[in-house]
Image: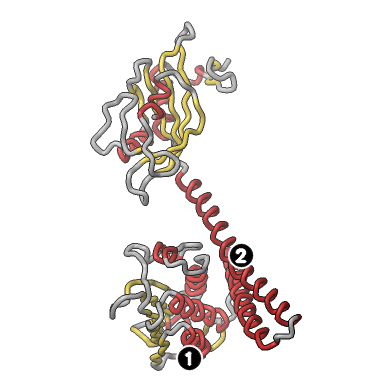
Amino acid sequence: MPEESSADPSLSVNRDVFADEDDYRAFCEAIITVADVGLLVLDKHGEFVLLNPTVRKLLSSAFRDGHDGRAGQTGDLYQADGVTEVPQEMLPSTRAARGEEFNDYFLWMGRDPELRRALSISARLMRDKDGEPSGAVLVTRDVTEVTRAVRAREDFLATISHELRTPLTSLLGYLELAAEETAAGRTDAVQAHLTIAQRNGGRLLRLVDELLNAATLTSGLELVRKPVDLPGLVSRSVESMIPAAGHAGIDLSYLPEPVPVLRLDEDRMTEVLENLLTNAIKFTPRGGSVEVICTTEGPDAVLTVRDTGIGFPAGDGAAIFERFFRAPGVQQHAIPGVGLGLHIVKVIVEAHGGRISAGPNADGPGTAVVVRLPLARLGA
């Protein structure tokens, strides 16, 4: 019959399948070694008597000068806010060593905010045959991805609520003013109020379109390809953005070169261009410039949009194409948006078999976004 664990009647081990104690010990060690959770066992004096590879790896990131193998050593351990250090008396090992049992104690391990891990730690006491505490077992789960996903969702909800509320509040306010002016017979002021209301309504529509686009792209993107003159398509997109650039005080220019006809989804590629141009104009201060270049380089048709805007931190070149990514400079300057435009662009470009990258503007401050479309694959 299986021998049941006294700690938990739901767990049992059939010792009959093991040849001897050495065989059983090897079985236990194999489970402890391959477990994807960190396992740490303390004796009744707080000494570490067992650490599996998972917990050893985690400890190395928090105790850069090594660990003395006892409960209570402080290191790069932070509370839920990611800033406040965990005091010695609240360390999981300290609590377990003084006889506490707990579930899902949360902390951050590691000093670098980009590399640190979020951990959920639980502890259970071990007892000897007389029922006296003889040590403790701590189980550590890495919950970094879940934690960051939850925070990303919360940040997104906060951002989208703000981005939708701001133009909606303005729109309703100017419509109310227009109604009051109409009632008072001052029709000369009504048109100005309605123009502002219309502009805010357009901003709301663009936000909703971005959200719907992002939802559609996650379920797969179907392209309707046909022969397209890429320089001509770029020219039309640039022309459509000239009023917005002029209103923002931005010099918008286009340098076309001959490019072979490509088989593209014209509507989707127009969406790519409009997103890139809108971003470049939005993130460039008044008096700056946006330049669009369409040419061929080797096996690719190359579309470059570069601006003299605020740029982004080094190392964020790939991150800016992730959903809901907002660079620190964008947030600091309170530039509206939810971080979906460049993600949508990346999905469309890659669906065409192309590649997209972003980096600093080689000619000065700002950003250069480069789209490469393979001539051989997309040739008409």
Q: Work out how far the residue at label 2 is from the one at label 1, CA to CA, in angstroms.
A: 34 Å
Crowding at label 2, few (<14), some or many (≥20) Cα neighbours within 10 Å?
few
Q: Is mark 2 on a helix, strand or loop?
A: helix
The reply, left or right, for residue 205 in relation to residue 269 is: right
- Give the image location of residue 222, x and y in percent: 59, 73
Relative vertical location of residue 135 with respect to residue 246 in this rendering, above or below: above
Please identify the residue farthest to the left as the structure is shown.
65
Q: Is residue 91 left or right of residue 156?
A: left
Q: Position of residue 315 (x, y in %)?
A: 33, 62
**Residue under label 2:** 165
Q: In this view, does 205 lie to the left or right of 85?
A: right
Identity, as a three-letter code, of the amino acid under mark 2: Arg
Establish if 201 lies above or below 123. below
- Depth-wise, is mark 2 or mark 1 nearer the camera? 2
What's the image's color scheme? secondary structure
Residue linked to disc 1: 235
Q: Which residue is drawn at 46% across and 13% down?
A: 127
In-image side of 319 versus 187 (left or right): left
